[in-house]
Image (tube, rainbow, N blue to C red):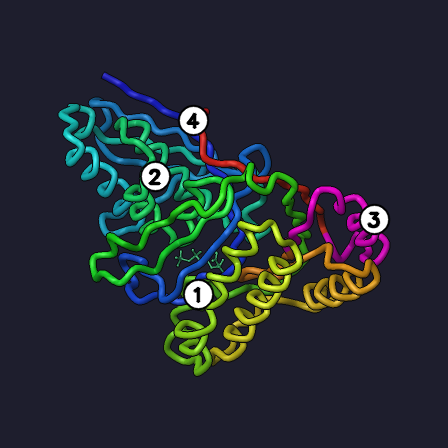
Amino acid sequence: TMLSVTCKAPVNIAIIKYWGKRHEELILPINDSISMTLGTNELCAKTTITASEKFQHNRMWLNDEELLFEEDSRLMRCLKGVQRLAHINGSQEASLCWKVHIASRNNFPTAAGLASSAAGYACLVYSLARLYGIPLTEELTTIARQGSGSACRSLFGGFVQWHRGVLDDGSDSVAEPVASAQHWPNMHVLILVVNDERKKTSSTTGMQRSVTTSQLIQHRVDKLVPERIANLKKAIKARDFQSFAEITMKDSNQFHAIALDTYPPCVYMNDVSHAIVNFVHTYNKTTGTVHAAYTFDAGPNACIYVLKENVAKLLAAIQKVFPTDSIDTVEYLRGLAVSPE
Ligand code: DP6
């Protein structure tokens, strides 16, 4: 009369950024994106779902606080989506009709603004799939996508491409693994958590505003992103860090240029973020070859892609240049995939 599962899902860091939707509710993007998934031992979401015939209502807790489980919410769309998939897969389980209690927790400060929704919704959808006995497929990523766009990429480990797709129902807007974490095992990420008090425009609102007001965004979508996706995949296949780094930094800069071209502008990076950009370029120049590549999402924190053999030297240089009051914490991470607990 009762079923329960617990799963973990990791954060992913976009290398080519998703920014802008062509369908708000289905969460269909206007461009492809590629990210790397980090390890579940570090930054991750952990979710326990219990289904019982005794439960009267669906309920959800995030970091111990109860949320409203609204009929027309992203949460409900994910729940119904996985239940529908279970039906299609031929499941006759009575448990499909039972109400669920969902408890989710992030093992990192939500305030750090680090893609918590990506790990959270990936974890939710993966846990539901385990609960109803559904395998992890590309179709499952279309459901995670409806929780938060970037969440669909966190269902797979390693390097992952989210295809924008062309169909109106979104069935071809799926995430697909490009290369496993083992393919480039010495690829690591440093996360510099930058102190910041300013209230940021959420990704959802910011990208809506960019789509309606930015004059640069269409050129990015039509021409620049497709070229970049092809070149990045080549760089990943060849484990070519130089090319990888250049594409990563250029795409981060371009995304923030689009954010500034939005009206009113979305300002996500602060003075410390810009100092980190300068530092990385100077550092790469002094080492004679490119050892570090920064990227920034919709906030001031820096993610720095760096090969394992170069981590210690880079860390030492960062600690020399940045006083501890401008950077809160430095996390050192490595990638894998969703897993049952
Ligand atoms: C800048 O996935 O959080 O991190 O789909 O509206 O939930 P919604 O947005 P979200 O946007 C992430 C934007 C980004 C770039 C990226 O992760 O690709």
Q: Which residue is at the front of the view, 60 or 149? A: 149
The residue pinned by badge 1 equals: 19
**Amino acid type shown at disc 2:** Val
Which amino acid lies under the numbered mark 4 shown in the image of this protein? Pro
Does the beta carbon at disc 4 come under 8 Å from ligand 1? no
Please tell me which of labels 4 and 2 falls first in the chain: 2
Alpha-carbon span between mark 4 and mark 2 = 12 Å
According to the picture, the residue beneath numbered tag 2 turns out to be 125
Which amino acid type corresponds to the residue marked 3 in the rendered image?
Answer: Ala
Give yes or no for contact between labels 2 and 3 (Cβ–Cβ under 8 Å): no
The residue wearing badge 3 is: 316
Calculate the distance from the C-alpha at mark 2 to the C-alpha at mark 3. 39 Å
**Chain part drawn in magenta:** 303-327
Dot 4 falls on a residue whose secondary structure is strand
Residue at 71% in and 50% down: 328
The residue mark sitting in front, 2 or 3, is 3
> Does any atom of ligand 1 lie closer than 8 Å to the CB of label 1?
yes
Pick out the residue farthest to the bottom.
Answer: 215
